[in-house]
Amino acid sequence: LFQIFLDKMSPSYFLLVCLLLPLLSLSEVPSSTSTPSCSYNHTILRCRWLNTTADILDTNTDIAQSVIRVEISDSRVACLEWRHFSRFQNLQEIELTNSELKQVMCGGHKVRHKKAVHHLRYLRYLNLSSNALSDLDDRITVLHHLEMIDLSNNNLRQIKCDFSNFKRLKYLDISNNNLSTLEPLPPSISYLSLSGNPWSCSPTLSWLYPWS
């Protein structure tokens, strides 16, 4: 059917379609000239084309107090500066996807980040899927109240953090990465997605078999 459609298309119209298709395919790709944009609707703050998490600081103070969920997508955020989220004191969920994220936390000592997340006591859900994470260090454990973590579709090769520090963790998705080994998880886990990883065949991973 597509071939018939092409056969019947006039040369001038065909040329126009060929010129427009590349423009349409690039319309959603953030560029260096894209202006950061955030919108608020029913306790949800949605942002696109951010270059840093500092771009969310422009949010009105009254709105910040009512935000429960922050969604960031189609951006270029290399790392998360958690002090930028501390103004959202009722925040429960953070979703940052398709944003080229390389580090869960920007450079700095674990104590610094612990102070920054002190006000995020209600945060329970963290979705960092479809980014460029290659490793996960122990600094993320300052978010020990998390119940759900999604790290799927990244490039994770190693996880250095001790998940046992997440006493409330119930949901963990680490599918579609490059992991070959993993430390034991807390007994609170009720959902674990492991597929799409080159797991090594080792007795030390025998505890994973029931989840496979």
Image (spheres, grey):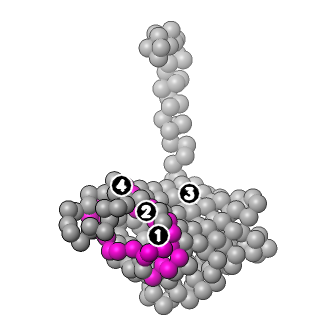
Tell me the kind of residue under disc 1.
Answer: Ile
Q: How many marks?
A: 4
Residue 189 badge? 1
Neighbour tally class for label 4: few under 14, some 14-19, many 20 plus, Cα within 10 Å: some
Disc nearer the start of the sequence (3/4): 3
Q: Is residue 52 visible in this depiction of the protein?
A: no
The amino acid sitting under disc 3 is: Ser
Q: Position of residue 70 (x, y in %)?
A: 63, 65
In the rendered image, the vertical position of residue 64 relative to residue 142, given as above or below: above
Res. 195 mark: 4
Q: CA distance from mark 1 to mark 3?
A: 27 Å
Relative to 72, residue 18 above or below: above
Looking at the rendered image, the disc whose residue lies closer to the viewer, 3 or 4, is 4
How far across and how far down the image is residue 135, in percent?
Answer: 35, 70
Residues under numbered marks 2 and 1 in contact, where contact means CB atoms less than 8 Å apart? yes
Q: Residue at x 50, y 31 (%)?
A: 21
What type of secondary structure mainly makes up the magenta span? loop
